[in-house]
Image (cartoon, rainbow, N blue to C red):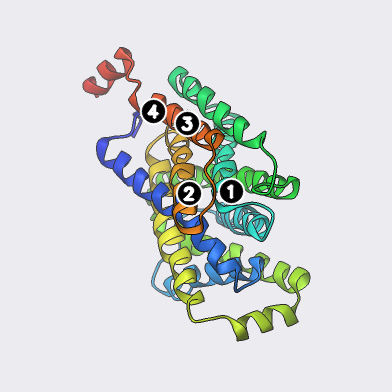
Amino acid sequence: MTSHHLSLRDTALALLVVFVWGTNFVVVRWGLDMLPPLMMAAIRFALVLFPAIFFLKKPDVSWRLLGLYGFCLGTGQFGMLYLAMDGFISPGMASVVMQTQVFFTIVIAAHRTGERPKLHQMLGLIPAAAGLILILSHNGEDITPVGLALVLGGAVCWGASNQAAREASHQAAARGNPMNPLAFVVWASLFAMPGLLLMSLLLEGPARVAQAMATSEWTIWPTLVWQSAANTLFGYTMWAWLLSRYPAATVAPMSLLVPVFGMGASALMMYEPLPAWKLVATLLIMAGVGINLLWRPRKTLVSGEAG
């Protein structure tokens, strides 16, 4: 698909994905009360990997792209995010800062493919960037320099994984075997889980991990299943599918709505304060997404009807 605008159906799908992603920040925070961050991330991807890998054929893409996607998504994005949320940043703020991935996604895509953002997409990023800057300027209990650095690192990795997913989709199509996004996410977890497990054993230590597993309440398992099934299998499968159909600059800005759901869920379920500056920042981000979604240049409409 060459359209630069999401269809109504795909817009609804993208909104469902970002709702799951946004509310998941609170679920992660609950899990971190029981498990060390890196071990929790490793278990998350283990549940994505097994038993699904035994029922899904490896997608017809290179091991390099599978490894790049798995490493960036697992060890990079979620490894750093979980570490940050273990006392260095609140769920609501993490959901916002992570959305700097939009800028990294567009820059990486432009560098790798020469894909240039459209004017309305760049205009939409202006108020969104202003909202992010407003949030980043309010360091305090909700956000620390360490937490900020870790989440920004995770955002870079998310941008890289987005590009890897797009390149994998194009590679599979060129080989005459359209990529199954679900199989891609599952097989890529082969490269996500080992790095997280090794880092957990080295940094968190076997003793801490064993004690946490022994003392965790049963509620840790619904938390882990939600993260693996809803957030990863559903969310990232559908996201990879959208990236295979639209330019990165069209899909990526939809994730700017994650903070709306993330901050809302954090306020409702964890009583995170919502001062005026947070609300203003959220409105700026929503304005940016609105410009990206609702702008319909006449030239685009005509060419779309002709196709």
What is the x, y in percent for residue 163?
54, 42
What residue would you read off at disc 4?
290
The answer to which of marks 2 and 4 sits earlier in the sequence is 2
Name the amino acid type tagged 3.
Ala
| Up/down of 58 relative to 123, above or below | below
Within-10-Å neighbours for mark 2: few <14, some 14–19, many 20+: many
Name the amino acid type tagged 1.
Ala
CA gap between label 3 and label 2 equals 22 Å
Task: Please say if the residues under marks 2 and 1 sit with CB atoms less than 8 Å apart.
Answer: yes
| Up/down of 98 relative to 7, above or below | below
What residue would you read off at disc 1?
94
The answer to which of marks 2 and 1 sits earlier in the sequence is 1
Q: Residue 262: which numbered mark, if any?
A: 2
Q: Residue at x 44, y 48 (%)?
A: 264
Circle 3 SS class: helix
The answer to which of marks 1 and 3 sits earlier in the sequence is 1
